[in-house]
Amino acid sequence: WRYRAMRAQRVTLPGHLSEAASDPDDVRVRDLGTVAYAEAWEAMRRFTTARGPTTVDEVWLLDHPPVYTLGLNGQPIHVLDPGTIPVLRSDRGGQVTYHGPGQLVVYVLVDLGRRGLGLRRLVYVLEQAVIDLCAGFGVEAERRAGAPGVYAGDAKLAALGLRVRRACSYHGLALNVDTDLTPYAGIDPCGYAGLRVTRLRDLGVAAGIADIKRRIVPHLLDHLGYAHPEARAARHAA
């Protein structure tokens, strides 16, 4: 197999990157719908480059058309048989993963210094948001030492990949809600041969992506330390 070139295109973001936070708890949550991975990636990098010390933090909720992505140091040997699905080298951490319809992607564009967060704490926060979400449905989920992400039993439910530049984060997490899991057979998920993957639907959760978005945002913003997450999410939604 070989890499399929994907040309990054510009995404027009709502609002203005120069907007200043009126207080440290300001955050904007955007529901962007379906966005090509290359477009979202370019938009995240552009946002992070343009932001200043008072730029409002943002959380993006979206999904991607089918694509495999390799992390910055990802090994191509873990891409087994991509078939017709494009493979894109990204600048996030981690190995190879799959994105596609039925998967909720959450990108966190956060000034970590302003929030007093380190990378390890951010990983913990993202994992805990998913764990808390699952608990609300009566599903037991957990993290694993040395293997970032969220697991249900012996299967991975959510993958994480992050990049920090100038003390600001981008990329985030991918949660399988009602994803077609077949494409995972074309890779070693997250670099682990034979790693099982699962989705919320197979864990007995009938909620769709719209409901999962509504439920996960308060958990995420709460763990990130923003005040009154539900009120702020509603007030700042695009």
Image (spheres, rainbow, N blue to C red):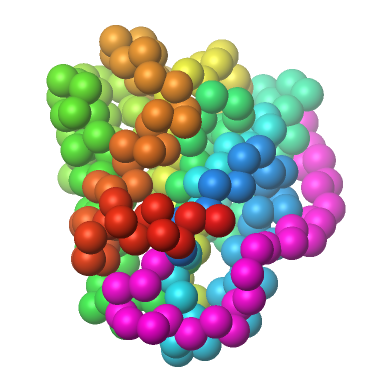
Report the magenta residues as a range. Answer: 1-27
Q: Residue at x 40, y 53 (%)?
A: 234
Dividing the picture into quadrants, the one containing residue 132 is top left
Q: Where is residue 195 shown, x and y percent of the image?
A: 38, 24
42 over 166 or under it: above or below:
above
Is 176 on the left or on the right of 76, as rendered? left
113 over 108 or under it: above or below:
below
Instruction: Report the residue that reaches farthest toward the bottom.
Output: 53
Q: Quadrant of the N terminus?
A: top right
Q: Where is residue 179 shown, x and y percent of the image?
A: 51, 20
Q: Residue at x 26, y 66 (%)?
A: 226
127 over 12 or under it: above or below:
above
Q: Where is residue 180 shown, x and y percent of the image?
A: 55, 16
Q: Is residue 73 visible?
A: no
Q: Residue at x 34, y 47 (%)?
A: 217
Is 53 on the left or on the right of 221, as rendered? right
Q: Quadrant of the C terminus?
A: bottom right
